[in-house]
Image: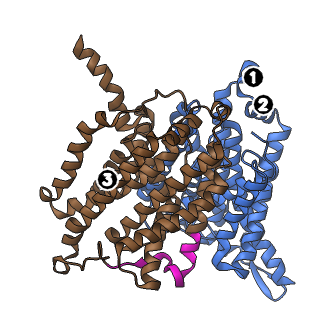
Amino acid sequence: MDILVIHLFNALLYASVLFLIAGGLSLIYGVMRIVNLAHGNLYAFGAYVTAWVVGQWLAGSNIVLLYLLLPAGAFAAALLGAILEPTLLRPFYRRAEEYQLLVTFGLLMILEDLMHFLWGPYPLSASTLFEKMGSLKIGDSVYPRYNLLVVAIGGLAALALWMFVYKTRFGVVLRATSQDMRRASAMGVNVNRVYIQAFTIGCFMAGLGGAIVVPGQSAVLGMGVDALVLAFVVVVVGGLGSLEGALFGALIVGVVREIGVSVFPEIELAVLYLIAVIVLLVRPAGLFGRTA
Amino acid sequence: MSTLPLTLQARSPMKVLPWAVPVAVLLFALPHAIDPYKTILLSYGLVMGIAALGFNLLLGYTGLLSFGHSAYFGVGAYAVAMMFKYFHVRSMELFLLGAILASLAISALFGFVCVRYTRIFFGILTLALSQVLWSLAFKFYPITGGTDGLRVPTPTLLGLPIETGGDKILFLARNYYYYVLGFFLACVLVMWIIVHSPFGKALQAIRDNETRAEFIGIHIRRYRFVAFLVSGVFTGIAGALWVPLNGLTTPDILYWPFSGEIVFMTVLGGFRTFSGPIFGAVAFNYLKTSAVGFTTYWQALLGAILVFLVLALPAGIVGTVVQLIPLARKRLSR
């Protein structure tokens, strides 16, 4: 029984982080119709910033302060996004998709090396936050409390995002722009502002994903590239551009991966990708997607 | 897509020969003028040129952007490595045959799924499928060697015993260079015939206007599927030819950033021209090698070049030159 609970927690842990990454990717696609290949690097950027602030710069400070600084990576990623969108991506919205993919691929290469330049080739960790929380007894086993915090943050982020998109005035504007950019513009919506806001929120979520993951595992080069393909699986399963889909997809991927790691470790990744392919064949727009 | 000026026009063979023949002669003569290291580098470029040529049949001629061409390159390479590991094959011709069959099978399987989609979904689907292969190569350590990869020794060419006194560098720079060059020229010729055949024209019609192409009776999905197969096999051949140069197959060539590199080199040369991808592949190879030697942050450098390219020279190097020629002629004749 307790083993099952632990597996469930692990699946939720994984799903939370994936939702933060894939949700941002999906939000950006939904509003701007751009698939950002560098999105995984914003996740990695968030992880590095938090690891650096908590693990190096202010290491040894008051633990409460360090916990409060956990989201530093999210804000840093949001700031980076707010700079990148108007400068690099805006000229490409009217261009063919090939060019959009290429420019974000170029961005991916640049960001990968930026992190290498800033923080060197070695892994960076912020494990104090993980260790200080201790662990919880579940039956005969122990489970780190920090992981539960990650699940809670993931759940809260999903809730906050849902409220934001469906319950606020800004959400209405966002959805209107996503449905018909021209008409929204004709109704007086400042589309450029909506774009920059949506992109910033997307990057904030990715950065938050990185920030909460880094106390449990180190920030390493290449983590963004790895994360992006999994985020792709999530959005393909759930439907590109749909937040509910991202949540559902993240849960599926989280559960399948948790089962996979213990039952069929060799083909765990292959099974995930195959699920994505099957979903695309049966429902081209994803389980929650709108047909384009 | 359709906003770009069309430069993939029909050219008669007579018009191509005046510059194709000197280039071929130059490629034949070069190993005697430059040092072996540079010759090997050029071989890498020619091999990637075959891959880019195959890739561009989809991007430039059919209008489908694949972000998963690492799959066919990797399948070609791993076919070679497996044939050596399990059947102790040493003959390059058998390697190539195996690579062609393997990449044909995989691209038939993947193509069957992928050609139902276009645009962004085609890109994501090809990417996801290529990553299935990557994860298998990565995880099945006993078969694929995992991240260690599989080592493949020098193959025999055309059934001849290996000469040059066991000097691998000299073998690669002389015998193997001409072997690669032969295949490269054959691939260029075959691709040239394909894109100028009625089949190639039909692909371009599909690219320019899917609905109209369907109206005049072109079976779109079947044409795309065949283009996908040809593209996959060309890339598979490139993968097989790449193995002796590298001596080792690792999962890196199946990982999706490698697909990104194939896209990069094609766009660098210009995907709206026939020779662009070839030129782009050779140029990219030199660029990457010198960037790696020049700075630790070569990735950022290449990324910046890619962003600049897409912003300022979307037609690529060859594409831009082709666009400039008529302008220059006009200036001169005035």
Image quarter for residue A128?
bottom right
Name the residue type under label 3. Leu
A91 and A114: which is toward the camera: A91
Name the residue type under label 2. Ala
Name the residue type under label 1. Arg
Residue at 63% over, 38% down: B218
B158 and A94: which is toward the camera: B158
Q: From mark 2 to mark 3, how far is it between C-alphas?
A: 54 Å
For disc 3, the marked residue is B185
Q: Residue B187 bears which disc, if any? A: none
Q: From mark 3 to mark 1, how far is it between C-alphas?
A: 53 Å
Instruction: Please say whether residue B137 is one of the residues in the magenta stretch.
Output: yes
Image position of B331 (left or right of B297): left
Residue at the outermost top position: B334
Mark 1 surroundings: few (<14), some (14-19) or many (≥20) residues within 10 A: few
Name the tint of chain B in the rendering. Answer: brown
